[in-house]
Amino acid sequence: MNAFALYGRYVAASLRAQAQYPAATLMLTVGHCAATAIEILGVFALFDRFGPVGGWSFGEAALFYALVNIAFSLADLLTRGFEVFGTDFVRTGAFDRVLLRPRAAALQLAGHEVRLSRLGRLLQGFAVLILASSLVPITWDAAAVATAVWAVAGGVALFVGILVLQATLAFWTVESLEIVNVLTYGGVQAAQYPLNIYAAWFRRLLTFGIPLACVAYYPVVAILKRPDPLGAPDWLLPLAPIAGFAFLALSFLAWRAGVARYESTGS
Amino acid sequence: MPSVRPYLAAFRARFQLMLQYRAAALAGFATQCWWGAIRIMVFAAFYGVHAAAAPISLADAVTYVWLGQALLALLPWVADPEIGQAVRTGGVGYDRLRPLDAYGYWYVRTLGWMLARALPRAVLMMLAAGIVLPLVGLGAWAWRPPSGMAAALLFLPAFVLMTALGAAVLTLANIVVAASLNERGVNAVLTPLVIVFSGSLLPLDFFPDALRPFLHVQPFAGLVDIPFRIYFADLGGGAALQGLALQAGWTVVLVGLGRLAMERMMRRLEMQGG
């Protein structure tokens, strides 16, 4: 069985388990949708009171918000195994069992638990995307759709990369470090406003350190067909999401170094 | 009048236990620093374009953010995870056997849980945002002391009442958890409600003006918005007293509701586990 078919089996098993409790799954999804959607209320209230900021109206800002939330929700679906890796796999010794199977450990972890409730964030992301499209004239031609899909793909790669790094740290700490939430949930929080409203040091961090701006800000500027107020050249904007894939590749290098030195906790 | 000693003991036991989680406190502190920094940068950007539209000054908004991050653990936005566990394992049966008022017992344990998580984070945040930031020359972004003696004196009862109100909300949520056997559904409702209506997401006056009459009288306002505005004297004199009265009034109402719900829940409780 090839890797994709195996992953499909993992997902199917996960979905069947959740289908045993349809009402609970539905309510958790609605709850997750509501809990993550309150942020757009805050964004709306600020724009409603102060008017446009950094040259962006609420509708345009909503597009930044929508794409980063869509990307994060998809990454969140894929990475439960990495998120709980320290607590549920390293500390308990369950990772020994994963390594014994003749399949890539990362694939098994990615299929560990696919939580349907995470679609709640995806739903609200799409709702905000529709809202944004109705508030500002975005021409959804082939190029714009391709840029959006490419940006989301880069965003998924970046967030998966961050979670793989969190899991890698667990080889040393034997715990899932929740401090990484600063980069995941905190990253979403930061990237849902346009980059040019932030201070320079923070912009640099979000571009060159954790390249959130490359998967959210720059491609959205390209979709809106606006010149970047920060002065990035037009041809660069749609290319920026590649930084997300580069980050993911580096994360997997670190992950392999971690697996190589793994000695089991002996539990 | 029964003795308060067992309640004090229950409070102290929970408080001391929760203080042991130092790594969790440090992680929470780091997360809240980051969150606070983002919030403040966003506020600064909006104030930069149209400061006159804001209901409070930027310095007050910055203090509001730090105060909110420091006291985040006092906000009743997730039910106590131990309650769900105790109900599912049958451990809640022991609470039934104690010769104590069940509501009072749960209330003080909740209070201990909230305060012990809040205290170390608040101290760290005060050091970082109140002392280190001004020392490194970032005084404009610092957490400021209360605006004057009157504000400081009024903030004391406001703080006590916000804690009492928070514990009342959370105890009520815990009772619903016990009745429904799982905390996830309760949290799904509780979290967005509390984050938005307490003023934790944004100070309530930042929402559209038409909503003000409603936002200022609902119970969650007493958790963040009222005490913090008393702190920087946005609410002073009569308005501050009115705010304190609102906090106290809702605390009494929610404790009353909680006692009714507790009685009902305990009568119908079925033991799980074995």
Image (cartoon, helix red, strand yellow):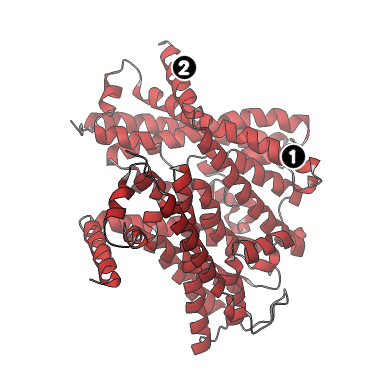
Q: Chain of mark 2?
A: B
Q: Chain of mark 1?
A: B
Q: Quadrant of residue B211?
A: bottom right
Q: Which mark is residue B104?
A: none
Indicate the secondary structure of the residue bearing disc 2: helix
Residue B203 makes an appearance in the image: no
Horizontal side, residue A218 vs residue B192: left or right:
right
Q: Which mark is residue B8?
A: 2
Indicate the secondary structure of the residue bearing disc 1: helix
Residue B43 place in picture, x, y as percent: 69, 56
User: What's the residue type where badge 2 is placed?
Assistant: Leu
Residue A7 makes an appearance in the image: yes
User: What's the residue type where badge 1 is placed?
Assistant: Val
List the residue tagged with mark 1. Answer: B132
Q: Residue at x 70, y 73 (%)?
A: A55
Q: Nearer the viewer, residue B28 or B157?
A: B28
The answer for how far apart the CA atoms under marks 2 and 1 are is: 36 Å
Q: Quadrant of residue B69?
A: top right
Q: Residue at x 60, y 56 (%)?
A: B207
Residue B158 place in picture, x, y as percent: 62, 32
Which quadrant does the C terminus of chain B fall into? top left
